[in-house]
Image: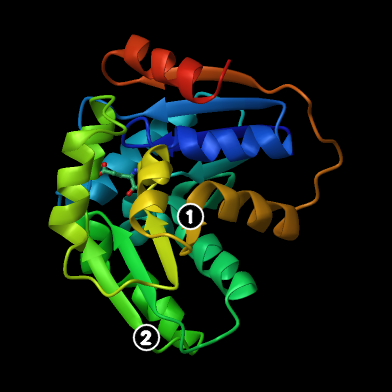
Amino acid sequence: MLKAGVFDSGIGGLSVVKSLIKEGLFEEIIYYGDTARVPYGTKDKNTIIRYALEALEFFKNFDIDILITACNTVSAYAIEELKNQASFEVVGVIEPGVVALKNRVKDKNSNILITGTNATIKSGKYKKLLQNQGYKNLQEKATGLFVPMVEEDIYNGKVVDAIMHHYFKDIQKPDVLIMGCTHFPLIENEYRKFFKNTILIHSGEAIAEYLKDKFVFKNFFSKTNIKYFATENPNHLKKTAKKWLSL
Ligand code: DGL
């Protein structure tokens, strides 16, 4: 496997790209951010599926080996449709997140907080998969405001503190927290400040592990060539990538 397509509604998928680069899994990554239509997390199921299939059309112009749906919201609603219509492998981030949690958290009574967009939480996808694995103590919280905030390059400070407080003030401190949206690792430090000593599950780290486990990688690359595409303002995406990926 040499060439991957990575798809998100916006810049959040860069947190997945960061993990893929770190592990050296691909020689080339084609990144597509649907920045003209972000956020997806406020949209309904049919719209999310339609946007995902449009992204798939885009990737058909490239000779990719695998499409990584670096968006929990799309992974919650459109993964089957993408798999059915793609001529390459398609992997979402929710199942890998659950596998990563299962590998790290052996106590089935652990208090687990699932955070994500409104759509992801509404889908109940994480909850169902975790219940199937025997986890009993699950809380869910939709934290969609973090998405436009991160798209606006706000990663810390008073706005973040206020939104954190707004969402989490009544939440019982979890043992484990799923950052069930790929935008959230961009404010991972703030999550860590708010929830000290909580285990954080990160979609990027989870999928990198999952891919290494499921597929054969004959080579690991010390450098990944990345091409960026966005449906609006690609320069902002590139600028964020430069900063976030330290390129
Ligand atoms: N980054 C995405 C996710 O993982 C989508 C955020 C959004 O567009 O609302 O869910």
- Look at label 2 and name its amino acid: Asn
Question: For residue 21, what is the image quadrant?
Answer: top right
Q: Position of residue 44 (x, y in %)?
A: 15, 54
Q: Judge left or right: residue 50 versus residue 200.
A: left
Asked if the residue at tag 1 contacts the one at tag 2, i.e. Cβ–Cβ closer than 8 Å, the answer is no
Q: Does the residue labelled 1 lie within 8 Å of ligand 1?
A: yes
In the structure shown, which secondary structural element does the residue marked by tag 2 occupy? loop
Question: For residue 172, what is the image quadrant?
Answer: bottom left
- Look at label 1 and name its amino acid: Val
Residue 93, numbered circle: 1
In the structure shown, which secondary structural element does the residue marked by tag 1 occupy? loop
Residue at left offset 20%, top offset 32%? 37
Question: For residue 189, what is the image quadrant?
Answer: top left
Residue 98, compared with residue 83, is above or below; it is: below
Residue at left offset 35%, top offset 20%? 230
Residue at left offset 40%, top offset 80%? 111
Quadrant containing the C terminus is top right
Residue corresponding to mark 2? 137
Looking at the image, which is closer to me, 221 or 141? 141
Residue 106, compared with residue 114, is above or below; it is: below
Residue at left offset 42%, top offset 52%? 192
Q: Nearer the viewer, mark 2 or mark 1?
A: 2
Q: Judge left or right: residue 240 versus residue 161.
A: right
Q: Position of residue 68 (x, y in %)?
A: 52, 44
Q: Spatial distance from mark 2 to mark 1, Cα to Cα?
A: 22 Å
Q: Earlier in the sequence, mark 2 or mark 1?
A: 1
Looking at the image, which is closer to me, 21 or 217? 21
The answer, for residue 45, to whether it is visible in the render is no
Q: Where is residue 1 in the image (x, y as percent from the top left)?
A: 74, 39
Q: How crowded is mark 2: few (under 14 residues within 10 Å), some or many (20 or more)?
A: some
